[in-house]
């Protein structure tokens, strides 16, 4: 049975979400601001972020989205003559997706919105194993979508809070039709154990199912409804002695993970061949693992107006990456040891803004000042306070909106 575009999106969404969170943490400064960037689409392409030292990744152009024309254009339709090092991975994707029978992945240009561009990029991640992307605004309402590669984008060992948050956040980024299948794929790709749990009689009557995902530092029990949607998640930290023993056995039994079906194109080389897509692991008890995958994300600036791939300047730069902040898609997670529900049904519902830091303590009410005639000194103080308030307001208006940068990283 062939897979649909939605099936491929389901398989990619959670690992992509974790990779983008990792990428955002690498890019943002201590104030949560995004760095300026510069892109070079020559035979040795590079995407540089203005940090100390500069953070330079290898970009792979996937395609471009035109908001004005409402269409997506695949980079393999190389109308601007980019070198193989820039669009070679897209060409390999074209060869591979031709056999999948999914029209949206084989037509050079399709009607689209921003979500379409994001979903096509998720498919590219799944097929290449490059798990980080960067959507680069290129002017004229066009965004160029890139996959990026760098050793620092590789994810470390799975941590339970990160896994749970990635599931919750991933469900907010795009439509996920089968949450259970998406979680199985995440376990397979990321390399953590996932086991089926028994359900109570009441849960069985409601056709609910449960799974437990493991990491070295804890576990989480996820409940699904009859439509395979997440309805509850309970996190447990640390592992009990019994669960530690079970975890060790499960890790030892995890199968190896097949390589990505499309090998990313190295700079300066021609596009390579493709191999059949690896089947999704659907074992009910243990889901196959994968070694931490490199996160993928990338910006590409300077573009031809519309959905076409950008014009090919030797280099382009941007200072518009102003809006930055902690990702607004992660759910609240209890920081202390707990077995209480972490996310209530559905897991995708938590408001991203509610995650941040804990609320500040309420201020004590102030007593109204008695009416009195203002002295000259009092009037001066009032003028100074007003001027200070105006300066503060002006400074606040200059600050970038904190959600924008990370929204772009998530493609939303």
Image: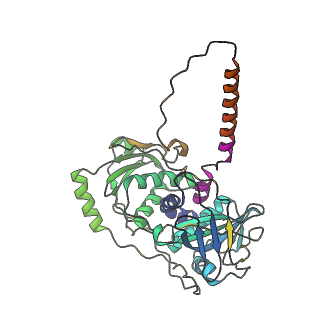
Q: Which residues are magenta?
A: 394-412
Q: Is residue 62 above or below residue 329?
A: below
Please tell me in which quadrant of the rendered image residue 9 appears.
Answer: bottom right
Camera-side residue of 7 and 339: 339
Q: Horizontal and vertical percent for residue 58?
A: 56, 74
- The answer to if 12 sits in the magenta stretch is no
Please tell me in which quadrant of the rendered image residue 205 appears.
Answer: top left
Q: Is residue 166 above or below residue 151?
A: above
Q: Quadrant of the C terminus?
A: bottom right
Q: Is residue 144 above or below residue 97?
A: above
Single out the residue that lies furthest toward the front. 377
Q: Residue at x 69, y 26 (%)?
A: 380
Q: Horizontal and vertical percent for residue 64?
A: 69, 68
Is 85 situated left or right of 155 in this image? right
Chief SS of the magenta region: helix
Can residue 281 be seen at all in this image of the molecule? Answer: no
Q: Horizontal and vertical percent for residue 76?
A: 66, 78
Is 374 situated left or right of 49 in this image? right
Is 44 situated left or right of 218 in this image? right
Camera-side residue of 22 and 197: 22
- The answer to if 396 sits in the magenta stretch is yes
Camera-side residue of 187 and 215: 215
Q: Horizontal and vertical percent for residue 37?
A: 62, 66
Q: How many marks?
A: 0
Can residue 311 be seen at all in this image of the molecule? Answer: yes
Colour convention of the picture = rainbow
Is 232 situated left or right of 61 in this image? left
């Amino acid at each position: 049975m062939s897979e649909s575009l939605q099936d491929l999106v389901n398989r990619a969404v959670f690992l992509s979400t974790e990779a983008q969170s990792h990428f955002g943490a690498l890019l943002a400064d201590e104030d949560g601001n995004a760095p300026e960037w510069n892109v070079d689409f020559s035979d040795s392409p590079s995407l540089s972020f203005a940090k100390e030292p500069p953070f330079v990744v290898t970009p792979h152009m996937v395609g471009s989205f035109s908001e004005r024309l409402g269409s997506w254009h695949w980079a393999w339709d190389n109308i601007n003559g980019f070198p193989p090092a820039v669009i070679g991975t897209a060409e390999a994707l074209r060869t591979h997706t031709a056999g999948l029978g999914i029209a949206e992945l084989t037509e050079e240009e399709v009607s689209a919105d921003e979500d379409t561009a994001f979903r096509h990029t998720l498919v590219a991640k799944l097929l290449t194993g490059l798990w980080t992307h960067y959507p680069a605004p290129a002017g004229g309402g066009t965004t160029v979508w890139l996959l990026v590669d760098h050793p620092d984008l590789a994810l470390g060992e799975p941590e339970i809070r990160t896994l749970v948050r990635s599931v919750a956040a991933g469900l907010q980024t795009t439509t996920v039709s089968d949450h259970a299948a998406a979680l199985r794929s995440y376990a397979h790709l990321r390399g953590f154990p996932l086991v089926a749990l028994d359900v109570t009689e009441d849960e069985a009557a409601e056709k609910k199912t449960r799974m437990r995902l493991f990491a070295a530092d804890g576990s989480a029990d996820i409940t699904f409804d009859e439509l395979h949607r997440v309805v509850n998640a309970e996190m447990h930290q640390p592992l009990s002695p019994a669960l530690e023993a079970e975890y060790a056995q499960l890790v030892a039994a995890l199968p190896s993970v097949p390589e990505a079906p499309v090998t990313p194109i190295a700079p300066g080389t021609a596009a390579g061949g493709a191999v059949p897509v690896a089947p999704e692991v659907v074992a009910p008890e243990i889901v196959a693992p994968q070694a931490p995958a490199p996160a993928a994300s990338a910006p590409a600036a300077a573009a031809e107006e519309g959905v076409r791939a950008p014009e090919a300047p030797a280099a382009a730069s941007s200072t518009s990456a102003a809006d930055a902040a902690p990702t607004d898609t992660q759910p609240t997670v209890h920081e202390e040891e707990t077995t209480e529900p972490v996310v209530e049904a559905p897991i995708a519902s938590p408001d991203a803004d509610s995650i941040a830091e804990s609320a500040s303590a309420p201020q004590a009410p102030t007593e109204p000042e008695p009416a009195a005639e203002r002295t000259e000194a009092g009037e001066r103080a009032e003028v100074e306070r007003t001027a200070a308030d105006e300066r503060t307001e002006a400074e606040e208006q200059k600050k970038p909106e904190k959600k924008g940068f990370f929204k772009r990283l998530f493609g939303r």
